[in-house]
Image: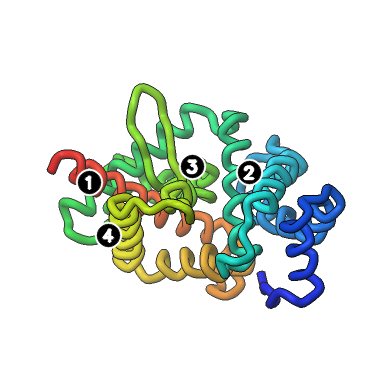
């Protein structure tokens, strides 16, 4: 999604809102940036089960946009679109979690697949191949690919949920939630954030080439799975499989890293 530089009219609208906090200025800003909600909701909706209503995603996203408008600080030098997209995405993911839209059995399969990928990577010292993963799970390649399709709905938004917490109940925390408050000054927390970013960057760099490319095109270039498929000349379902494997590897890598940090 192309982000245009802030124009003078747009800046004046923000300045008016900061100065007066008027309802009219707030509503004008929400209307101006409403397309961001549709954009984010559309990307998240890719691969979700049919029973998830896209209008629900947009509804959740609107709350994120409102929150972004109310908390944005023009003087920080961060583009509003960049700030708002993270808030909108977070609100939609929070809404999906509250709906508990993924069956527990599917979550269990995803966790098992993540565990197998992590164990194989640790044993082999590299990313495991499809054949190695399927063999470790006593599955044929056909059944393995079918499993990837089944659990793909748990991973299409997972780079926002990579930081896993294991307790009595399943819980996830988005990486974005670990970013330090702009008003905060805790140096220890800032070091922890930088360590998470560095570990995630290293994990992405160690992905197989095609998985790394899909992650880059989807998360950094903002392309849809269909658009990625056209670039790589493969089907959208195959792109989804590649994405699912990549995210499971990343989650396993960060989970192991977190556990090692806790035991040190």
As rendered, which of 80 and 263 lies closer to the eye? 80
Image x and y of residue 154, in percent: 50, 42
Closer to the N terminus: mark 2 or mark 3? 2
Q: Earlier in the sequence, mark 4 or mark 1?
A: 1
Label 2 residue SS: helix
Q: Position of residue 233 (x, y in %)?
A: 56, 73
User: In this image, 45 relative to 255: left or right?
Assistant: right
In the rendered image, residue 115, in percent from the top left (x then y), is placed at 29, 41
Q: Earlier in the sequence, mark 1 or mark 3?
A: 1
Indicate whether 52 appears above or below 34: above
Q: Residue 151 — which label?
A: 3
Between tags 2 and 3, which lies in front?
2
Q: Number of marks in the image?
A: 4
Residue at the spot 29% in from the left edge and 64% down from the top edge: 202
Label 1 secondary element: helix
Secondary structure under the numbered disc 3 in the rendered image: helix
Q: What label sits on residue 21 in the rendered view?
A: none
Residue annotated with mark 4: 127
Q: Is residue 141 left or right of residue 121?
A: right
**Disc 1/disc 3 C-alpha distance (Å):** 19 Å
Name, please, the residue furthest toward the front: 19
Q: Nearer the viewer, mark 1 or mark 2?
A: 2
């Amino acid at each position: 999604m192309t982000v245009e530089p802030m124009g003078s009219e747009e800046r004046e609208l923000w300045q008016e809102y900061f100065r007066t906090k008027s309802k009219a200025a707030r509503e004008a800003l929400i209307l101006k940036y409403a397309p961001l909600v549709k954009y984010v909701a559309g990307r998240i909706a890719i691969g979700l089960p049919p029973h998830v209503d896209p209008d629900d995603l947009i509804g959740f996203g609107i709350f994120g946009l409102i929150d972004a408008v109310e908390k944005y600080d023009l003087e920080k030098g961060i583009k509003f679109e960049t700030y708002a997209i993270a808030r909108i995405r977070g609100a939609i993911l929070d809404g999906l979690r509250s709906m508990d839209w993924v069956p527990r059995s599917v979550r269990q399969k995803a966790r098992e697949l993540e565990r197998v990928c992590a164990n194989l990577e640790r044993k082999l010292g590299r990313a495991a191949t499809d054949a190695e993963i399927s063999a470790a799970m006593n599955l044929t390649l056909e059944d393995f690919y079918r499993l990837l399709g089944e659990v793909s709905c748990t991973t299409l938004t997972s780079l926002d949920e990579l930081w896993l917490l294991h307790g009595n109940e399943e819980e996830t925390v988005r990486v974005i939630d670990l970013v330090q408050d702009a008003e905060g000054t805790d140096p220890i927390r800032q070091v922890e954030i930088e360590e998470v970013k560095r570990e995630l960057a290293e994990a992405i760099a160690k992905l197989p080439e095609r998985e790394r490319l899909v992650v880059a095109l989807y998360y950094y270039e903002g392309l849809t799975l269909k658009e990625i498929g056209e670039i790589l000349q493969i089907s959208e379902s195959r792109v989804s499989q590649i994405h699912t494997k990549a995210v499971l590897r990343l989650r396993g890598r960060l989970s192991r890293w977190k556990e090692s940090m806790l035991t040190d």
